[in-house]
Amino acid sequence: MRIKRQGIFVFPQKQINFTFEGKNLSGIKTDTIASALLANGIFVFSYSRKTNRPQGYTCSTDFCTGSCLMTVNGVNNVQTCKTLLKQDMKIERNRGPKHVTL
């Protein structure tokens, strides 16, 4: 859900297109990657290295768990909670040992 208007204030919402695991989605200019994914109904951001269980976005709790790390334009382990969305980004979940940084 997006707030488009609050009282007399109107929030401009310039659309930005991106792909998430091959699926075409859109966000707005002020989105981080994480907020754009959440707005599009994507709630699984990564998978546990040990159990492969899905993990959701938890950075908004002010306790970074690294669950928002994703592959963006071929670069592994990008913090999607802090990275602004840009036109035509290609975003994927990190999967498997090749994405693990120790």
Image (cartoon, rainbow, N blue to C red):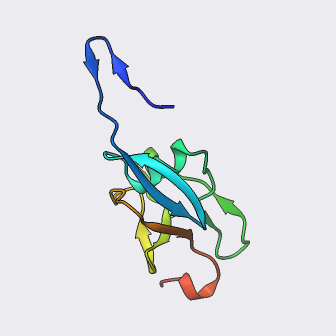
Q: Is residue 60 above or below residue 55?
A: above
Q: How many marks?
A: 0
**Residue visible at 61% across and 50% down in the picture:** 43
Q: Position of residue 8 (x, y in %)?
A: 26, 12
In the picture provided, is 86 more to the left or to the right than 93? left
45 to 38, vertically: above or below = below
Q: Nearer the viewer, residue 57 or 91?
A: 91
Residue 99: image location, x then y, percent: 54, 82
Side (left or right) of 53 relative to 31: right
Instruction: Name the residue: 41% across, 26% down.
Output: 3
The x, y position of residue 15, in whole percent, is 38, 45
Which residue is at the front of the view, 81 or 42?
42
Instruction: Name the residue located 42 percent from the left edge and 66 percent from the top edge.
Output: 89
Tell whether 14 sits left or right of 27. left
* Residue that sits furthest to the left in the current view: 9
How far across and how far down the image is residue 31, in percent? 37, 47
Task: Please tell me in which quadrant of the rendered image residue 20 appears.
Answer: bottom right
